[in-house]
Amino acid sequence: MFQTVALSGSRGERQLFSDVSVTVKPGTLLAVVGENGSGKTSFLRMLCGLLSPDCGAILWQGKDIRQLKELYSAQLTYVGHLNGIKDELTPVENLKVAACLAGDESSSTIVQKALEAVGLGRPVHRLPTRVLSQGQKRRVTLARLWLSTRPLWLLDEPFASLDAAATSYLTQHLQSHLSHGGMVVVATHQEIDLPPDCIQHLRLTR
Amino acid sequence: MSQPSLSEALRGVVRRDLLLAMRHRSDVAMSVFFVVIVASLFPLGVGPEPAVLRMIASGVLWVTALLACLLSLGRLFTADYLDGVLEQTLLIPQPLAVLVIGKVFAHWVISGLPVVLLSPLLGLQFGLGGESLGVLTLSLLLGTPTLSMIGSIGAALTLGLRGSGLLIALLVLPLFIPVLIFGAGAVSNSLAGIGSEANLSLLGACFLLSLAFAPWATAVALRIALE
């Protein structure tokens, strides 16, 4: 179980959100919504532990993540606003490194299967990521979710620049993660096509 | 749940950086050519007097190596910072300081090692011979990793700032001074016929000291830069 307790965050002088308390149970998705600049990205980075909250705490299985440190990082997969892939490397090389650094299996077959699952065919696998379109780069990034075996996924605008087909692949994959008892936090502007009983919404307002 | 072992994570970081350097061979070539050209400018400016050249050799070659390291420091974290790879690196469930050592090692292999390998040739150009050539190479081999280590602190502190290139130089060059003194001193001593062991030992001590403190300081600076 994943919880935030009376979390407040600010950037510089500006208060973004205050007193946010939510609980994400296994098998549920938390959709963080709010207008541009309402602090969705900061909220997600705070949940990763990249940003420290002004006050309040984030609890993983009842323990503060600031005490868990690396034990907590080993529980989460974060897909940020930035893709976190290298333009000079091919999609296969990028995913292999990412999987290796996450401690997941990183054989070529598994990586290629993940890329095909997000709809990137063989011809694309050997091209430098630099020449791919925005949407294709985003797919390469999201393919990490097909390799991940971690319970908590934190996704920042995962649907941005994806087409309808890729959006449906991702939604199906999120659903299968949830049905295996996973937890997902998504910052998004879009409606997610999942059964309403496994989604809860958090609206960030100043 | 999955977690990479420490050696796996370290190897992953180093392998990615070396792979990227292979794709950007011009970057590696650039720092080598920089050293060759700068070292060649001095004989042209000072004149071809062998005694003078031999006297300035150690200082010139060491300052050149130091500047080459400084030039490549900007690349250490900037690309990773801009494309989000650094963010992901911070989330690797292993101590960040150790991963920093991996990054610095890769940086040294790309920018420091070529200079070390080239130094005997450059030493010859300045009329160094026999033992002092060996001391020059050895002092650079001990000193350039220290430069990369110290430099990583500056690179991390100036990450994401405007005009960071100049700021790194201001922050890091004063810290390079001891390494420069011991390194150049080792070569001069061997030329003068006094043993160079003392200076080399001090260089080794500098390296160990930087290995103990720099990765930790860099890791803290990186966390602050990404806040």
Image (cartoon, coloured by chain):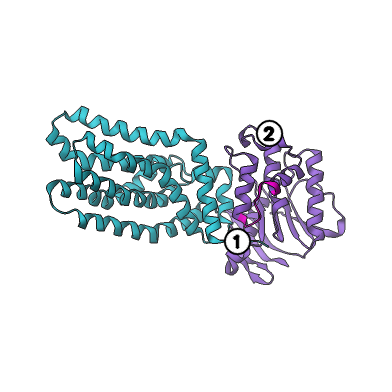
**Residue occupied by mark 1:** A53
Image vertical order of residue B131 relative to residue B214, above or below: above
**Chain A visual colour:** purple
Please, what secondary structure does the residue beneath circle 1 have? loop
Q: Is residue A2 left or right of residue B116?
A: right
Judge whether residue A82 can be spotted in this image: no
Where does the image place residue A102, in percent across and percent down from the top left? Answer: 62, 56
What's the magenta region? A102-110
- Based on the displayed image, in which of its 4 quarters is residue A72 positioned? bottom right
Please, what secondary structure does the residue beneath circle 2 have? loop
Identify residue type, mark 1. Answer: Pro
User: Is residue B123 inside the magenta stretch?
Assistant: no
Instruction: Kindly identify the residue that appears in the image at 25 percent across and 55 percent down.
Output: B200
Instruction: Kindly identify the residue that appears in the image at 59 percent across and 38 percent down.
Output: A87
Judge whether residue B184 can be spotted in this image: yes
Circle number at residue A133? 2
**Chain B visual colour:** cyan
Identify residue type, mark 2. Answer: Ser
Where does the image place residue A110, in percent across and percent down from the top left? Answer: 70, 49
- Which image quarter is the C terminus of chain A in? bottom right
Where does the image place residue B38, in percent across and percent down from the top left? Answer: 29, 33
- Which image quarter is the N terminus of chain A in? bottom right
